[in-house]
Amino acid sequence: MRMPPFTLHTPDSLDEALSIAGGLADSAEEFDWVAGGTDLLPNYKWHLNVKPHVISLARVSELSELSYTHIGAMVRLQDLAESDAVHPLIARVSSMIASVMIRRSGTVGGNICLDTRCFWFNQSEEWRESIEWCYKCDCGSGADCRVIPNQNTLCVATYQADLAPVLMCLGATIHLATPSGKRSVPLTEFFELDGITRNVLEPGELVTHLTLPEDISEWQGDYQRLRQRQSWDFPEAGVAVLWKSGSNGAPSDLRVATTGLEAIPGYHSEEAAAALEGWSGVDSIDELAEAVRKAVRPVLNTWYPPSYRRKMVRILTKRASSGLLEV
Ligand SMILES: Cc1cc2nc3c(=O)[nH]c(=O)nc-3n(C[C@H](O)[C@H](O)[C@H](O)COP(=O)(O)OP(=O)(O)OC[C@H]3O[C@@H](n4cnc5c(N)ncnc54)[C@H](O)[C@@H]3O)c2cc1C
Ligand code: SF4
């Protein structure tokens, strides 16, 4: 598959990157950011929503800072996996993503901003033409969504990245920058329930880094996921359960988040609060697992059918909660 033509910009600093972005916006030229390119470039090769300009963040060294409470957008996933400087669950989940080769190029920013996926969309141009396209990349045809037809206002392609649920449960804040300023939002509020817009990033805005609160060392937990081949496939369902130890065998706080089940990762604060109230060990875990299963709404656009993925959410939640019995 041939890469379509585009102009590549390679700024050496954040200021230069934002200035290029501002200049392109002023001249109404569309562009994409590229970090490791492991998601964007395969999509470009399949001619999926290609832009005429691409701004590479590879030389922007300010975005690679890494400490216990600060993760730069350009930190490579493999560096995170091998790091002693981060929360152990962040390192473990990073080590589970894709394969070593992909992790050596793929970045935290790229993983958080991963494009949503759908089996009607992640296909070659010839294949998509043969079904007369779909709404997310309609090639000017006005094509319908293949998963939920007759609406054409919403794409329900699935968010299939592993890092977000764990970072959400650890209380991460995501920091964004545009040519005109900076802002920060809780990671739980970063995603937008639309497979095309995906998140709150404005045109020309980028992710600079994530920060974590000082208390993350008090949080422990687990992340469990379902995927077709353990060697490198995208998650078909993923559940993070994190807690703070309490007294009398009960956790003092509990957070649950999911991925691979909708167009955005899910943060299940109500379900976690209900389980925490009147905690009773195994029974509370069973109730939590059933509540999370009921809360997720997968659609038929990934490898496994939605009914199976929902059933597995119950099992994954129980598995990820098993450490709660030792609190
Ligand atoms: C075969 C295969 C298997 C995979 N398996 C998994 C898996 O098991 N689990 C998992 O989580 N992921 C998986 N992935 C996805 C992989 O983790 C991502 O491709 C990677 O994290 C993307 O990072 P990147 O730096 O290469 O992003 P890029 O490809 O450079 O960018 C991805 C998207 O993010 C945007 N972007 C990148 N950086 C920024 C920024 N700083 N600010 C704003 N926007 C930005 C880009 O514009 C683009 O839209 C897999 C990928 C492949 C190819
Ligand atoms: S969910 Fe619908 S619009 Fe979105 S990629 Fe799939 S078929 Fe296309």
Image (cartoon, helix red, strand yellow):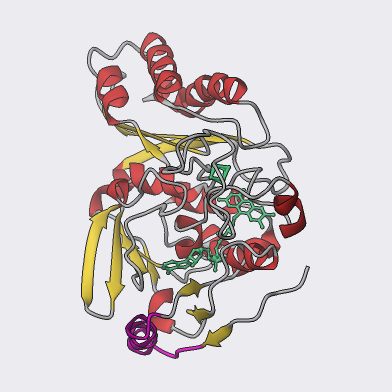
**Residue occupying image coordinates x 40% and y 76%:** 63
Q: Position of residue 196 (x, y in %)?
A: 46, 52
Instruction: Identify which residue, 214 or 285, lies in the foreground.
Output: 285
Q: Position of residue 306 (x, y in %)?
A: 58, 25
Would you say 77 lies left or right of 125 here? left
Which quarter of the figure is the N terminus placed in? bottom right
**Residue occupying image coordinates x 55% and y 58%:** 81
Would you say 229 lies left or right of 59 here? right
Would you say 294 lies left or right of 308 here? left
Q: Position of residue 323 (x, y in %)?
A: 45, 27
Residue 248 visible? The answer is no
Instruction: Identify which residue, 54 or 323, lies in the foreground.
Output: 54
Residue 94 visible? The answer is yes
Q: Is residue 162 above or below residue 287?
A: below
- Reply yes or no: does residue 15 show up in magenta: yes
Q: Which image quadrant shows ligand 1?
A: bottom right
Instruction: Identify which residue, 91 or 236, lies in the foreground.
Output: 236
- Reply yes or no: does residue 99 show up in magenta: no
**Residue occupying image coordinates x 47% and y 37%:** 262
Magenta segment range?
10-28
Which quarter of the figure is the C terminus placed in? top left
Q: Position of residue 146 (x, y in %)?
A: 59, 38
